Image (spheres, helix red, strand yellow):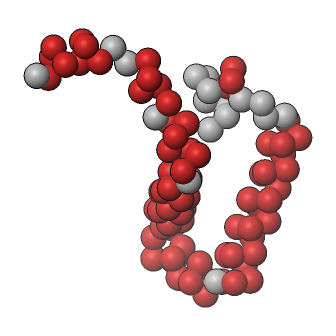
Amino acid sequence: MSAHSTIKPYANVSSKDIDDSNRYVASLITRLMTRDCPKQAKAAFQNGGTSAFEYAFGIVGQVAMQELMTEPAVSQALGAFDKYLDKDTFNKVFN
């Protein structure tokens, strides 16, 4: 996410951090697909090709985002802009 053009100027992520993360994810996926669940991974590939993996990892990403969003500090940070909303203008429109 830190590579997104809107977020990049505010992210403090080094090239080493990104490389470390990529190494960790590659190791995790390798372990999951070759040691922990090789039969399931092979069956998924035989039945759905790479689309099966794209779908599965899409779900993993959704669950990960849900987990991030349930952290109280994240919810507070995402809603912090509320104090700057022009509530009078909103009241005129919605009341």
Left or right, residue 89 beside residue 61: left
Residue 56 percent across, percent down from the top left: 50, 66
Q: Nearer the viewer, residue 61 or 32?
A: 61
Q: Nearer the viewer, residue 60 or 38?
A: 60
Left or right, residue 61 beside residue 87: right
Q: Is residue 3 above or below residue 84?
A: below
Q: Is residue 93 above or below residue 27?
A: above
Residue 62 percent across, percent down from the top left: 48, 57
Q: Residue furthest left?
A: 95
Question: What's the residue at 67%, 32% (across, down)?
Answer: 3
Residue 88 percent across, percent down from the top left: 25, 13
Q: Nearer the viewer, residue 91 or 39?
A: 91
Where's the C terminus, which quadrant?
Answer: top left
Residue 53, picture quadrant: bottom right
Question: What's the residue at 80%, 42% (across, down)?
Answer: 18
Residue 75 percent across, percent down from the top left: 50, 44
Left or right, residue 64 beside residue 83: right
Residue 8, picture quadrant: top right
Q: How many numbered discs?
A: 0
Question: What's the residue at 46%, 34% (across, down)?
Answer: 79
Where's the N terminus, which quadrant?
Answer: top right
Q: Is residue 5 visible?
A: yes
Q: Is residue 51 visible?
A: no
